[in-house]
Image (spheres, grey):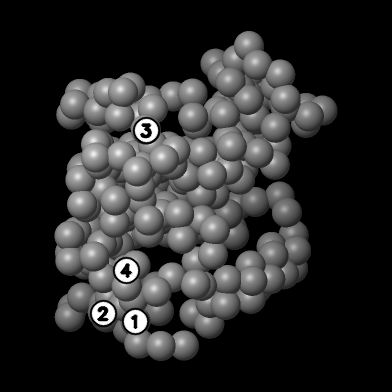
Amino acid sequence: MGEARIAPPEDAGSDPISGSALGHQPESLLAFMKLYGTLWSHGILDHSTKEMARIRNARTVDCGF
Amino acid sequence: MTWLPETAPGANPLERVFALRPNLFEAWRDFALIFWEKRLLDPVLLELVRLRVAQLHEARFPLASRRPEALAAGLDEAKIAQLDCWWRSSAFTETECACLRFAEQFVLDAKGMSDEQARPVIDALGEKGTVALVEALAIFDGFGRFCRMLGIEPEGTHG
């Protein structure tokens, strides 16, 4: 993996998501986190299936994040 | 309208499918709308990439709609009609061309994105704008796939 094309904001903190480049857009980040949280915590699909799909997708697009 | 055996009450084909998971639908809608409501990007640019992504997926449901924010900002059907061959048209600005090229690469092969494709977008939109564009592309791309996978078509059309 090469260097990130967009560095995180200087005050982004150490959280792996909010401390990433996503921190440049705090309003959309908040909305994304709500969606992501709903997907993982309030869904009807079992977690192992979702995690398998997540990892498979990350591998397909070669995303090490 | 969809091959799903079960649908929910709703005003259009999307609602009748997505409302099967109402909490997810609400959270997705809030996320998707924020780019328009908070004007995180120029609405004409955003609508052009939204429609181009839908074209690449041949997703007729998103292709059938127009965002009012973009129309109010001056986007017209004559320009939209040239979107499927934007690279041959003089109707698109340099920034729009860079973002359309970026959007196509995002959909077709994100890991193949080159610095030569990304740099003009970052130069034009800045870091904040580029993050907004990539997030919006993720929504548009996912939504196009969602509509294709679940057979969500505009009213009055058949698969």
Q: Residue furthest bottom?
A: A2
Please, what is the three-letter code of the amino acid marked with disc 1?
Answer: Ala
Name the outermost residue toward the front: B88
Q: Which residue is mark 2?
A: A7
For the residue pair A24 and B121, the one nearer the viewer reads as B121
- Measure how far apart labels 4 and 3 are at the Cα level: 23 Å
Question: In terms of depth relative to the viewer, which is nearer, B142 or B110?
Answer: B110
Residue B107 horizontal/vertical position (percent): 51, 56
User: How many numbered marks are there?
Assistant: 4
Q: Which residue is mark 1?
A: A4
For marks 4 and 1, give the one nearer the viewer: 4
- Residue at the image position 37 percent from the left and 56 percent from the top: B101
Q: Give the side of residue B53 with respect to residue A45, left or right.
A: left
Which element type, helix, strand or loop, lies under badge 1? loop
Q: What residue sits right under mark 4 in the picture?
A: B118
Q: Secondary structure at mark 4?
A: helix
Alpha carbon distance from label 2 to label 1? 6 Å
Q: Residue at 41% of width from left, 88% of height from top?
A: A2
Identify which amino acid the numbered label 2 is placed on.
Answer: Ala
Q: Look at label 3 and name its amino acid.
A: Gln
Q: What SS does tag 3 mark?
A: loop
User: Are discs 1 and 3 located on one and the same chain?
Assistant: no
Q: Residue at x 44, y 38 (%)?
A: B84
Q: Are marks 2 and 3 in contact (CB under 8 Å)?
A: no
Residue indicated by mark 3: B82
* Image marks 2 and 1: residues in contact by CB distance under 8 Å: yes
Q: Chain of mark 3?
A: B
| Towards the viewer: B150 or A18 | B150
User: What's the distance in space between the residues labelled 1 and 3, CA to CA?
Assistant: 34 Å
